[in-house]
Amino acid sequence: MKPSVTAHPISLVWLRRDLRLHDNAALYYALKSGRPVLPVFVYDRLILDQLEDRDDRRVEFIHREIQTLQDQLSEMGSTIIARYGRPIDVLKQIVEELTVADVYTNYDYEVYAKERDAVVKAMLAEQGIGFHTFKDQVIFDRDEVLTGGGKPYTVFTPYSRNWIGKLNDFYVKSYPTETYFANFAKTADLGDHDYTIPTLADMNFRPKGESYPVPTVNDDLLRTYEETRNYPAQAGTSELGIHLRFGTISIRDLVRQAQATSERFLTELAWRDFYFQILDHFPHVEKHAFRREYEDIPFLNRPDDIERWQNGETGYPIVDAGMRQLNETGWMHNRVRLVVASFCVKHLLIDWRIGEAYFARKLRDYDLAANNGNWQWIAGTGNDAAPYFRVFNPAEQARKFDPKGEYIRRWVPEFDSLRYSQPIVDHPMARQRAIDTYKKALNR
Ligand SMILES: Cc1cc2nc3c(=O)[nH]c(=O)nc-3n(C[C@H](O)[C@H](O)[C@H](O)COP(=O)(O)OP(=O)(O)OC[C@H]3O[C@@H](n4cnc5c(N)ncnc54)[C@H](O)[C@@H]3O)c2cc1C
């Protein structure tokens, strides 16, 4: 018999990319099921141990949010169990310690996550414990938005038309979790367990001590979003990426706000769903070109070029400004992400996977689906991608989107001086070299 300290079985809600109590699908269904509910979070060492930077912003953010959840739950007499380890081991340990009837969790579309969940589900099934998953982090998933022929969309415009057309109150209303908060398990009823949250140091991380964007966006910004979103010197975008990534805001709340203020912003949220469904339906994109014929582009991958691109020392001011913003803040404006990514792949002929991995290491809003989708779009290897012969001209982009050079001067203060690097490549040469290289590899 397993050691049981609860008189009645409880339900666990396993939080992952949904670090909030408000409007959370899995939490709602767990709370409604009638059993006492205990939230669980696993600091997954299979992911964390591989991170290169021990002052990783995302880990610190997650740690802060788990502490916030713990504070909110303890005010209700409850708690969260947060442990560091492999998910399978931690969950096994918890179901040995407590009498658990069911585990509720929100669906995750990444390949690793799907495999992880299958293993956990099987382990729980062996013990007669149910594993229930829910859609939460997107508006539509799996087969909810398909082409007329019943296939997943690979082109964004018709997808987004269908996505927007299908939006109705049912899909965007919040789950009223608050109504059932009385159903959180009471710490007093759970017996003596270790509810201490591991410290960053316990996991071999240290804080950076920076602040994060607030988890809200005001209506005024969204009303002018269409006009301001392309100008990196302005604070014209929401900077909600990190909150969407870790679920510290609800996508349903945000979509309702977008419906009332900005069609353009709504379309950006559709892009987010779009790339989730691409990853879900075409998991090969994680490591390979969406279009297989683009697999064999002979990228140069010169170590010196890679280093200068990463450090923001290419001698192309808009590129350098973007990379320095990324390195210093963990965020980069979308317009500049497009420019630096294009420069990396086309001007320097660096494999898009190298650029993608660098963004994955540095971006505080890093998300596999969006990052991969956007890199493949730029590289021309993706579904619905920019044609390979489209090579952004960095000087043109700077003239158009940073006409007074304000953004550039903010991040590249030596820009006007002799100390500023000479261009790493000549634009016309690099452009032609990229086109010729792609053309040859594609046999066109
Ligand atoms: C090379 C490259 C890599 C990128 N990597 C990521 C990434 O790892 N994670 C990420 O969330 N976005 C990524 N993007 C998309 C986009 O640049 C960011 O979502 C956006 O800049 C984040 O800032 P924001 O929150 O102020 O965005 P806003 O303009 O305020 O948009 C709101 C939200 O909409 C979503 N969104 C907006 N544009 C896109 C897009 N093109 N694709 C998918 N979702 C979008 C994001 O969730 C974003 O937070 C990448 C874009 C490029 C060109």
Image (cartoon, helix red, strand yellow):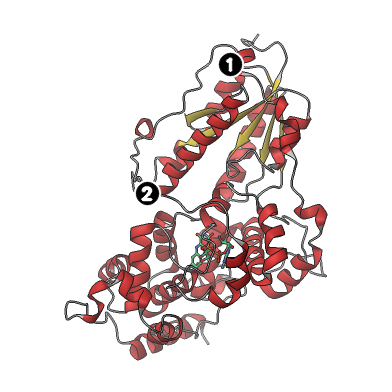
Q: 10 Å neighbourhood of mark 1: few (<14), some, or many (≥20)? A: some
According to the picture, the residue beneath numbered tag 1 turns out to be 97
Q: What separation in Å lies between label 2 and label 1 (alpha carbons)?
A: 37 Å
Instruction: Tell me: 257 left or right of 351.
Output: right
Examine the image and state in which quarter residue 73 appears: top right
Q: Is residue 48 above or below residue 191?
A: below
Residue placed at 73% from the left, 74% from the top? 158
Which mark's residue is nearer the viewer, 2 or 1? Answer: 2
Examine the image and state in which quarter residue 325 appears: bottom left
Marks 2 and 1, the one that precedes in the sequence: 1
Q: Quadrant of the N terminus?
A: top right
Instruction: Tell me: 68 left or right of 168.
Output: left
Say what secondary structure mark 1 lies in. helix
Residue placed at 51% from the left, 62% from the top? 371
Instruction: Tell me: 255 left or right of 96.
Output: right
Name the one closer to the observer, 339 or 79.
79
Q: Which mark is residue 210?
A: 2
Q: Is mark 1 within 8 Å of ligand 1?
A: no
